[in-house]
Image (cartoon, rainbow, N blue to C red):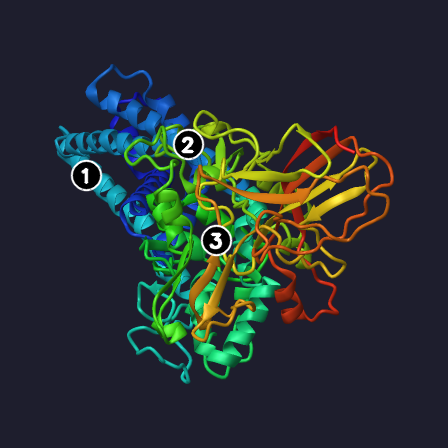
């Protein structure tokens, strides 16, 4: 039997094939692991991630067997620095393998790898190098200095062969890296504009009149900006994908009204003019060159399906607050099979790589810019200029500056400020790998929450028209949002409570028959972060519906009701805008490319109030027959608002006047819908009652 120090044992240990295999695989694992950390994202690096994973799994059994035998042979040695480095190397390797198995399982079956295990894996690599190199160098030096010349020579040969075989086993697998990389066939991207592309605003502005730009200055293949469903099918961002899939960002291009208006714009103003809309509504089609002269389908398949896709939002790296899609979009590199429409093994490889090697995925698609209102300003601010209307500059919707100048913005004081995402992207409890945030003052990296990607706003109509999955739920949430019924706990201390835009009826408590009554409906922009209403005010309508009944329910006065064709009664109090063209004609078909100004605009700034007066005569109990005359402003006979209103006067004494006022809202007026889809289509925008108030006036005295 040999002792641990016997010459034969030493020589045999250096020449064991098992040692060569274990050492070679460890060398390969170390090199590929460091490459994954130190080298930039690339196809070869992705191949090395896969080989690193396979190599680590292959290493498990031989390492366990070798380490057991090695320990059995040398466990009786006295403690020395060589023994200590050996034990440290063994411990580091065990930690490496255990952490590697955990990370592999997380990448294969979870939604993300653990940061803690990833750090442990990296530190164990450093510990292995710091221990195994001194261990081997010392043993090699001892072999060279062995006492007996014949034994020393044979031991040196054994050590040299060990080094050579280890190097071969550690290096040879690298041949697979370029081979596998060459075997992979990525989806070819056509990052060029069509040969017949019209550079109507010059070759240096291919996407004008939109202010949107690409980092390359040229086109991006539509596929490189699409593929949002993969974020859900991967199992990683499934809930975020489901929220987005029914949001206004998702259907911004497929919006039925947008498509019709775009077609009219192309017919009247040229297909190239629709690029003005594309930067915000349809970036995939814009950057792939679809909005081109003589192109019938101005929105490609990818664009109409995804609108503002995951990538087309997350790939924006620069914005400007001038609006009109003033942003710069990059084209992120993609992981293997990420653009392939496949299932099975390719999809598994795609998802595994993104989870196991997530650094590029995170850095390319997540950045601090998202957290600023300036990011939203790129699209949520709009103007028309001479390139479009042939006349000059006109401001349109402008949510950003509304917010910037409002009570909600306190520059430099995040604890008082409420920003866009805090309202429209409230926090949801989640297991999404994107949960947590250490950049928000009131959040933590491990808070277990993500920001909702529903982007709740004011379109409570289009999801149903498009028959999107989850439309009913989304519409119900949107209506609750419009009424101010959705709480946002993280900003509860600085956000108002109650209705978003409460309505209050102001009227006398007592009236006499024959009195000229004035009833006021007071509206207050209580919780909205910008003007109410906001958006395209030429088509949006918010109005007050008022009715006055007696104690029996007979209608004595009404205003703001809709007729059977869904038109609002003329002269009703309404929050909206009336833009005009250069001849003073009303812009009533959303033909903004002809707009030069506004003849009427009424909306409410954050924290401010507006009111409307309703005037009529308190009915007299002396009247014995119905009348159809009711003067709205009896004190001003010249007012253009004077008109008749049908009134049925009861034949008995009126003792109470019951006033009901409601703030009503719809996304699109009926005239536009009839123009776009025909008055026989039956299409009408959903109407939401945002707030209401009641008042009872006691009627007494008089004959």
* Residue designated by label 3: 310
User: Picture coordinates of residue 541 (x, y %)?
Assistant: 58, 54
Q: Is residue 142 left or right of residue 703?
A: left
Element type at mark 2: helix
Give 470 or 691, whichever is nearer the viewer. Answer: 691
User: Which mark identifies residue 156?
Assistant: 1
Q: Residues within 10 Å of mark 1 (few under 14, many from 20)?
A: many
Q: Are marks 1 and 2 in contact (CB under 8 Å)?
A: no
Earlier-in-chain disc, 1 versus 2:
2
Residue 372 at least partly seen:
no
Q: Is residue 369 left or right of residue 528?
A: left
User: Which mark identifies residue 116?
Assistant: none
* Quadrant of the image occupied by residue 178: bottom left
Q: Quadrant of the C terminus?
A: top right
- Compared to 561, does 700 lie above or below? above
Q: Nearer the viewer, mark 2 or mark 3?
A: 3
Give 417 or 16, whichever is nearer the viewer. Answer: 417
Q: Residues within 10 Å of mark 2 (few under 14, many from 20)?
A: many
Residue depicted at x 47% and y 74%: 291
Q: Quadrant of the N terminus?
A: top left
Q: Residues within 10 Å of mark 3 (few under 14, many from 20)?
A: many
User: Which mark identifies residue 99?
Assistant: 2
- Compared to 374, does 205 lie above or below? below
Earlier-in-chain disc, 2 versus 3:
2
Give 171 or 611, whichever is nearer the viewer. Answer: 611
Residue depicted at x 48% and y 59%: 600
Q: Nearer the viewer, mark 1 or mark 2?
A: 2
* Quadrant of the image occupied by residue 60: top left
The answer for how far apart the CA atoms under marks 3 and 1 are is 60 Å
How many marks are shown on the rendered structure? 3
Residue 419 at least partly seen:
yes
């Amino acid at each position: 039997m040999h002792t641990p120090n016997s010459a034969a044992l030493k020589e045999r240990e250096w020449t064991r094939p098992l040692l060569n295999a274990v050492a070679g695989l460890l060398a390969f694992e170390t090199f590929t692991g460091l490459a994954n950390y130190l080298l930039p994202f690339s196809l070869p690096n992705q191949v090395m991630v896969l080989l690193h994973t396979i190599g680590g799994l292959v290493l498990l059994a031989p390492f366990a067997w070798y380490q057991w035998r090695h320990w059995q042979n040398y466990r009786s040695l006295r403690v020395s620095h060589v023994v200590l480095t050996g034990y440290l190397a063994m411990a580091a390797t065990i930690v490496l393998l255990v952490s590697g198995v955990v990370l592999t399982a997380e990448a294969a079956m979870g939604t993300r790898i653990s940061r803690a295990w990833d750090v442990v894996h990296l530190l164990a690599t450093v510990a292995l190098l710091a221990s195994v190199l001194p261990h081997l160098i010392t043993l090699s030096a001892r072999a060279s200095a062995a006492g007996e010349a014949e034994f020393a020579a044979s031991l040196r040969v054994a050590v040299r062969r060990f080094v050579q075989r280890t190097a071969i086993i550690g290096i040879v697998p690298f041949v697979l890296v370029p081979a596998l990389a060459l075997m992979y066939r990525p989806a070819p991207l056509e990052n060029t504009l069509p040969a017949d592309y019209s550079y109507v605003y010059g070759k240096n502005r291919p996407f004008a009149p939109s202010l949107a730009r690409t980092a390359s200055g040229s086109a991006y293949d539509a596929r490189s900006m699409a593929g949002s469903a993969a974020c859900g099918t991967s199992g990683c961002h499934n809930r975020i994908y489901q929220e987005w899939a029914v949001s206004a960002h998702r259907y911004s291009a497929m919006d039925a009204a947008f498509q019709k208006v775009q077609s009219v714009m192309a017919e009247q103003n040229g297909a190239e003019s629709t690029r003005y809309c594309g930067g915000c509504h349809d970036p995939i089609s814009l950057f792939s060159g679809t909005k081109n002269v003589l192109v019938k389908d101005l929105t490609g398949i990818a664009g109409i399906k995804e609108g503002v896709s995951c990538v087309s939002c997350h790939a924006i790296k620069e914005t400007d607050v001038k609006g009109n899609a003033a942003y710069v979009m990059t084209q992120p590199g993609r992981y293997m099979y990420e653009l392939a429409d496949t299932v099975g093994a390719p999809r598994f490889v795609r998802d595994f790589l993104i989870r196991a090697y997530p650094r590029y995925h995170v850095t390319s698609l997540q950045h601090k810019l998202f957290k600023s209102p300036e990011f939203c300003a790129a699209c949520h601010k709009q103007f028309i200029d001479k390139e479009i209307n042939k006349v000059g500059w006109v401001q349109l919707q402008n949510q950003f500056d509304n917010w910037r100048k409002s009570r909600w913005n306190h520059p430099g004081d995040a604890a008082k400020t409420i920003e866009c995402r805090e309202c429209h992207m409230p926090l949801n409890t989640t297991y999404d790998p994107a949960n947590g945030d250490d950049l928000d003052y009131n959040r933590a990296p491990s808070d277990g929450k993500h920001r909702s990607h529903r982007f709740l706003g004011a379109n409570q109509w289009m999801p149903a028209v498009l028959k999107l999955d989850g439309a009913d739920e989304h519409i119900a949430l949107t209506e609750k949002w419009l009424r101010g019924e959705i709480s946002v706990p993280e900003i509860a201390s600085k956000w108002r409570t109650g209705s978003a835009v409460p309505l209050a009826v102001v009227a006398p408590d007592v009236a006499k028959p024959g009195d000229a009554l004035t009833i006021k409906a007071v509206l207050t922009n209580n919780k909205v972060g910008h003007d109410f209403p906001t958006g395209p005010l030429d088509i949006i309508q918010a109005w007050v519906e008022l009715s006055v009944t007696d104690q029996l329910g007979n209608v004595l006065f009404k205003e703001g009701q809709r007729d059977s064709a869904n038109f609002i009664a003329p002269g009703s109090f309404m929050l909206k805008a009336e833009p005009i063209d250069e001849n003073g004609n009303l812009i009533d078909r959303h033909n903004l490319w002809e707009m030069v100004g506004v003849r009427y605009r009424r909306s409410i700034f954050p924290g401010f109030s507006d009111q409307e007066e309703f005037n009529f005569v308190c009915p007299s109990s002396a009247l014995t027959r119905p009348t159809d005359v009711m003067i709205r402003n009896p004190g001003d006979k010249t007012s253009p608002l004077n008109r008749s209103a049908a009134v049925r006067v009861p034949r008995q004494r009126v003792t109470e006047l019951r006033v009901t006022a409601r703030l009503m809202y719809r996304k699109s007026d009926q005239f536009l819908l009839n123009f776009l889809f025909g008055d026989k289509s039956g299409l009408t925008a959903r109407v939401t009652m945002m707030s209401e108030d009641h008042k009872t006036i006691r009627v007494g005295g008089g004959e």
